[in-house]
Amino acid sequence: MSVVEALILGIIQGLTEFLPVSSSGHLEIVKALFGNNAVAEESMFMTVMLHGATALSTIIIFRKEIMEILTGLFQFKWNEQTVFSLKIVLSMVPAAFVGVVFSDQIESLFGSQILLVGFMLLITAALLFLADKAKTTDKGVSYKGAIIIGVAQAIAILPGISRSGATISTSVLLGVDRTKATRFSFLMVVPLILGKMAKDLLSSDFTLAGESIIPVVVGFIAAFLTGLVACTWMIKLVRKSKLTYFSIYCAIVGLIAIVASLI
């Protein structure tokens, strides 16, 4: 993998992890355009590092909220932070279950499956459009809502379904306040990403050549910096009900991917 390709993949990962347009779908499309021929270990390590970069971006943007949650938990009392943490744990269960039980089937979906990506992007577009039309409320995430949002996150494992788009849209459609929905959506994925990174790093035998390190570093930095910008931008966009623009974008890219795959 060249430095230029790593830079582009990093920028795309940083932007699309937070913007509701599917990071996995865009990475699959870009890899197909590049004719990515990287060996499995190199490709997997790059994927792990890019997701680690965006997880770090989330931690920095929400560092105040994360510190408040950790402080509240260490008080060992039934307080607001404990309740929020329990809801985060509940939201993680569906995706963790799917990721562990169906890991082989999921892996088979990633490999320039552009037709699948195209159809899933159309589903993302529909979700975003519906969410943008939902009424604005000041409700928070309930326990039942956390599980439903978690199911949406599990479905978003499919390439082309935006994780942030699916979880934020589901939250808003359940009547959750847009700002609270965005905050919950971004915080709920951090433990999953860190857990997935640990699993991949421990279970895989990465033997990268010296020349492969530089592209990984470049990709990591690019994903981290663009992730900081995209995360901050997304919070403002959801609050102002601007999801329709992303709905149109996903629909256009999805249709192009479908046509391209058929041709």
Image (cartoon, helix red, strand yellow):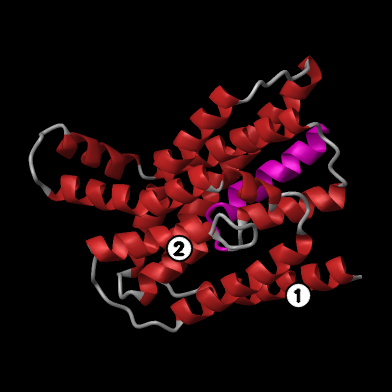
Check disc 2 and report the residue beneath it: 152
Q: Position of residue 121 (x, y in %)?
A: 65, 68
Among all residues in the image, which is located at the extreme right? 263
Residue 185 higher or lower than 213, as above or below: below
Residue 17 is one of the magenta-drawn residues? yes
Secondary structure found at label 1: helix
Identified by mark 2, the residue type is Ala
Residue furthest top as drawn: 210
Quarter holding the C terminus is bottom right
Q: Secondary structure at mark 2?
A: helix
x and y, in percent, of residue 220 in the image: 63, 33
Between circles 1 and 2, the one closer to the viewer is: 2
Give the labeled residue for mark 1: 255
| Residue 100 lies in the magenta stretch | no
Using a 10 Å C-alpha cutoff, classify the residue at mark 2 as few (fewer than 14 neighbours), some (14 to 19) or many (20 or more): many
User: Residue at 37% across / 48% down in the picture?
Assistant: 187
Q: Magenta segment range?
A: 1-20
Figure quadrant of residue 249: bottom right
Secondary structure of the magenta portion, mostly?
Answer: helix
Q: Nearer the viewer, residue 144 or 48?
A: 144
